Image (cartoon, helix red, strand yellow):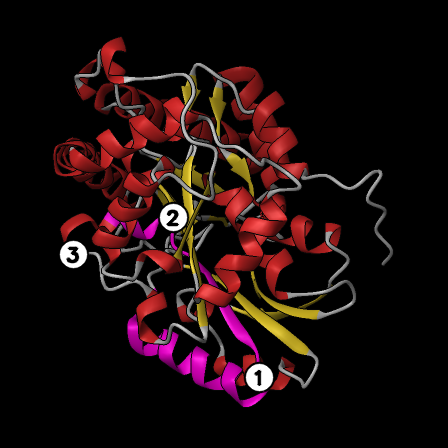
Amino acid sequence: MNFSRSVTGSPYMEWAKLHSSAKFILSASGVASYPLAELGVSPDHLEINGPDAYGHPPLISAIASRYEVPPDCVFTTAGTSLANHLALAATTSPGDEVLVEQPTYELLLSTARYLGLTVKRFQRPVSRDFQPDFGDLGRQLSKNTRLVVLTNLHNPSGALLSNETLKQTGDLARRVGARVLVDEVYLEMLFDERPVTAFRLDPERFIVTNSLTKAYGLSGLRCGWVLASPEIIHRLWRINDLYAATAVFPGEQLSVIAFQKLAQIAARAKRLLDINRERLREFLQSRSDLKTFFPEYGTIVFPRLKAGTVEDLCRLLRDQFEVAVVPGKFFECPEHFRIGVGGEVEAMRASLEQLGRGLDAYSATEGR
């Protein structure tokens, strides 16, 4: 299929910005926004303009310290999506082959195609609880593969990849000279149990993207980063000069403060998730009309609707029950839909109750 840069975009992001709003929001995948007031920041702490250089040293130092990597292996950017875009651009040329998990986050596919890459797929089947099918991965790899692309926690299912699984992926990629790009933005939701970043498993083989957006409710800071070898970091800065040569300095300053208070921010997020995930588990266990793999961590699940069509269900939920969930078509799984429960506790309780009413109404309609 041919893709034109003049018309290429992200169908999911367009839907999320224009059609995901509702009274009962279960379409968001991040943790509820963290209040600026709780950061304890006054205008005296901030400046509008700062040094114009390749990276804000205090922020790079904070990221390097947290992930126990050298500072020259850290590149900062405006969120994970741009980090993924630049990581793909820095490691490939138009026409190169990239091997992307299926299902996956739609924006990864749209970005790869926008960059003129040849996209191949390997399966993370629901029958294996969304773990990679290494037989399929091995068959799809070729001498033309430049990059294997994964999300961990998996988006849309929330499945966790172990370090052993990642090492096996890296070993397969090494055989054809490919690198492995791992989007770890949801991995932060393990909080204190968070495993070592994949980058440290093999700094020459792995590239990692991440941000403060999803797990900490700090999306507005747009604090994202890439962990990569110094050679790739050098390329990233030069490519980023073409997109966003100078970062927003108050955002960098606020991000440094956020890292200093990350334990406090994480504790609040974990409290929300502990309550919301238990309610979600009970809700899903009560539903005979859904089949669900329930992940150990994170805000999201990806249930399959046993009867009927998800498009019809989503339309009914939106129009009659004011509930927003994410249709599975955006993840190439039209029989599934994604639920996110990172919001405030009472809002999530009410939203799950309303979702249940909508599902009951839809089941009654299907039974006629």
Q: Residues within 10 Å of mark 3 (few under 14, many from 20)?
A: few
Report which residue position mark 3 lands on: 193
Report which residue position mark 1 lands on: 177
Q: Quadrant of the C terminus?
A: top right
Of labels 2 and 1, earlier in sequence is 1
* Amino acid type, callout 2: Val
Occupied quadrant, residue 159:
bottom left
Q: Are marks 2 and 1 in contact (CB under 8 Å)?
A: no
Q: Quadrant of the N terminus?
A: bottom right
What is the secondary structure assignment of the residue under circle 1?
loop
Report which residue position mark 2 lands on: 185
Depth check: 121 or 356 in front? Answer: 121
Judge whether residue 103 can be spotted in this image: no
- The range drawn in magenta is 161-189
Of labels 1 and 3, earlier in sequence is 1
What is the secondary structure assignment of the residue under circle 2?
loop
